[in-house]
Amino acid sequence: MLEKAAEFIKTSHLNIYDIAVITDKGAEHICCQPCNARNAIYSVTKLFIVTMIGILYDRGQLRLDDRITDLLSGGLDFEYDPLWNQVTVRHALTHTMGIDYGVIDIDRDDAAKYASQNYLKYIFSYPPVKIPGQYRKYTDVPHYLLSLAIEKIIGKRADEAITEQILNPLGIAGSAWARCPQNHTIGSSGAYMTARDIVKLAWLYQNYGVWAGTRIISEDWVRLAETEQYDLYPLGPSGFWGKSGIYGQMMMFSRAKGLSAAWLGHEPDSGNAKLLSWFQAQ
């Protein structure tokens, strides 16, 4: 399948770096052009944070109705709008915290110009403008806060916990993660991997939390992530679910087709959609 996909990428003049597929027959990976050993996966990073939150949920170390401010207590040594006290883990996972702006975006901003290099204080200086739970706005803020919550619960940086609890079991080695000026995992973006790496996360969700016979997350969590769309979204009518990132990143799976696929590149959304449509037609 990947040779045909690579040919489609070539004839369609898509700027895709590498692509990977997993089926019951095994895994395939092709580099479509010379590129870095690992590339930015942008917002696909969010699903790794979601998965780590799922592990804590499965262990009873965190509840969806836990308030973010309670989880981050001790780190909020500044004044903030009390509406923040209504924001829960579920609101963060579903981008319904009530904020109506991005506030932080490490991929597009000049972060050196932020009013504070304490990202938590900077974020909390912009209070929700809607009642949490009643308004959806996709931003990079929630997963930075979830990253800090993971750190508070486990006692180590979120990317360290993800490496131990997710990447090592999946056989993903050599990833790199962006951190803020205070050395906390960004979480919303900033991870560097290969398509061969992130397709493993797709396969994990395709198989309801089981990888190579070992359960990493519960089936309950996978179904919650799909039902409530914790950065896992239906991709058209073909049965694919997945998570994309800006500039042409994708990880997705289809239980009906029995395959998971992932690719990294530098394409506008229209180019990404062409490759998605190709897979949907197979």
Image (tube, rainbow, N blue to C red):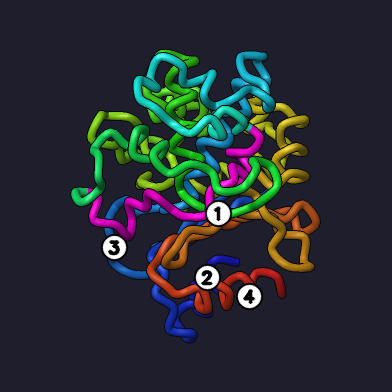
Of the numbered discs 4 and 3, the one sitting upstream in the chain is 3
- In space, the residues marked 4 and 3 are separated at their CA atoms by 23 Å
Q: Residues within 10 Å of mark 2 (few under 14, many from 20)?
A: few
Of the numbered discs 1 and 3, the one sitting upstream in the chain is 3
- In space, the residues marked 1 and 3 are separated at their CA atoms by 30 Å
Q: Nearer the viewer, mark 3 or mark 2?
A: 3
Q: Quadrant of the C terminus?
A: bottom right
Which residues, given as a range, are shown in magenta?
90-111
Q: Judging from the image, what secondary structure is the residue with disc 3 in?
A: loop
Vertical placement of 201 versus 241: above or below?
A: above
Front one among 85 and 146: 85
Q: Judging from the image, what secondary structure is the residue with disc 4 in?
A: helix
- Picture residue at 38% right of the left edge, 69% below the top: 266
- Picture residue at 63% right of the left edge, 38% below the top: 91
Can you identify the residue that label 3 sits on? 35
Of the numbered discs 3 and 2, the one sitting upstream in the chain is 2
Residue 83 at x, y percent in the picture: 56, 34
Q: Are marks 3 and 2 in contact (CB under 8 Å)?
A: no
Residue 169 horizontal side relative to residue 189, left or right: right
Front one among 90 and 43: 90
Q: Quadrant of residue 276?
A: bottom right
Vertical placement of 56 versus 229: above or below?
A: above
Q: Are marks 4 and 1 in contact (CB under 8 Å)?
A: no
What amino acid does circle 2 point to? Glu
Can you identify the residue that label 4 sits on? 278
Residue 84 at x, y percent in the picture: 53, 33
Can you identify the residue that label 2 sits on? 3
What amino acid does circle 4 point to? Trp
Q: Quadrant of the N terminus?
A: bottom right
Q: Which mark is residue 138?
A: 1
- In space, the residues marked 2 and 1 are separated at their CA atoms by 35 Å
What amino acid does circle 3 point to? Cys
